[in-house]
Image (cartoon, grey):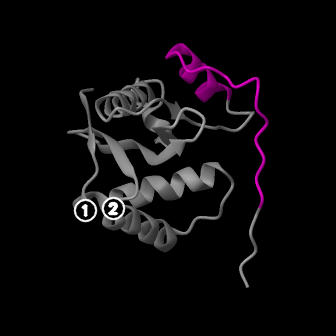
Amino acid sequence: MSIAIREANPTDVSAVAELFDLYRQFYEQASNLPLAQQFIVDRLSNQDSVILVAESASSGLLGFSQLYPSLCSVEAKPIYVLYDLFVLPSARKAGVGRLLLLAAEAKATAEGKARMDLTTAHTNRAAQSLYESLGWIRDEVFVAYTRPINQL
């Protein structure tokens, strides 16, 4: 299977939203295709993320990754946060995730980013193995916290 990686464009919204909805379900969120579609429309319209898609001529979109530009205050340089990476279950173990990660790295390099950061579930061993095979380094220094902000 020949797989091409490219940046998503407005004509990809429906297909990317379906992948995004499946991604959210993987992380135990209820399916909500309208929410997924609006989120993807907003990201592309606002140009506040980069969405890379993996596409097969015969099967359509197989996966995506989403990069958010950010800054590292310590290094005083721009970085990318690779927040989302998802491959359809039927396309896993075909190198799609690897291609998406390599394309993200090439984009970060071309744009002069100092590094890319990502997080994944402790239980997502398959993804961790892939990341480490590509030279990603597990953070053993910092502890991550999150603070939900309630909406009124």
Q: Are marks 1 and 2 in contact (CB under 8 Å)?
A: yes
- Is residue 13 found left or right of 23 in the rendered image? left
Split into 4 quadrants, where in the image is the C terminus?
bottom right
Task: Locate residue 97, reporting x and y percent.
Answer: 44, 30
- Is residue 41 found left or right of 25 in the rendered image? left
Closer mark to the observer between disc 1 and disc 2:
2
**Residues under labels 1 and 2: Cα distance?**
7 Å
* Res. 25 in view: yes
* Residue 10: mark: 1
**Of the image marks 1 and 2, the number of the one nearer the N terminus:** 1
Q: Say which quarter of the image contains residue 83.
A: top right
* 77 or 61: nearer the viewer: 77
Split into 4 quadrants, where in the image is the N terminus?
top left
**Crowding at label 2, few (<14), some or many (≥20) Cα neighbours within 10 Å?**
some
* Res. 83 in view: no
Q: Residue at x 33, y 60 (%)?
A: 47
Q: Residue at x 56, y 21 (%)?
A: 136
Predominant SS of the magenta segment? loop
Task: Locate residue 12, reporting x and y percent.
Answer: 28, 57
- Is residue 82 found left or right of 42 in the rendered image? right
Residue type at mark 1 is Pro
Q: Say which quarter of the image contains residue 63.
A: top left
Per the image, the residue denoted by label 2 is 44
Task: Locate residue 61, reporting x and y percent.
Answer: 32, 45
Q: Magenta span covers which residues?
A: 125-147
Q: Is 81 contained in the magenta span?
A: no
* Residue 93: mark: none
Q: Residue at x 34, y 57 (%)?
A: 15
Residue type at mark 2 is Leu
Query: How many numbered markers are drawn?
Result: 2
> Which element is circle 2 on?
helix
Q: Residue at x 43, y 58 (%)?
A: 18
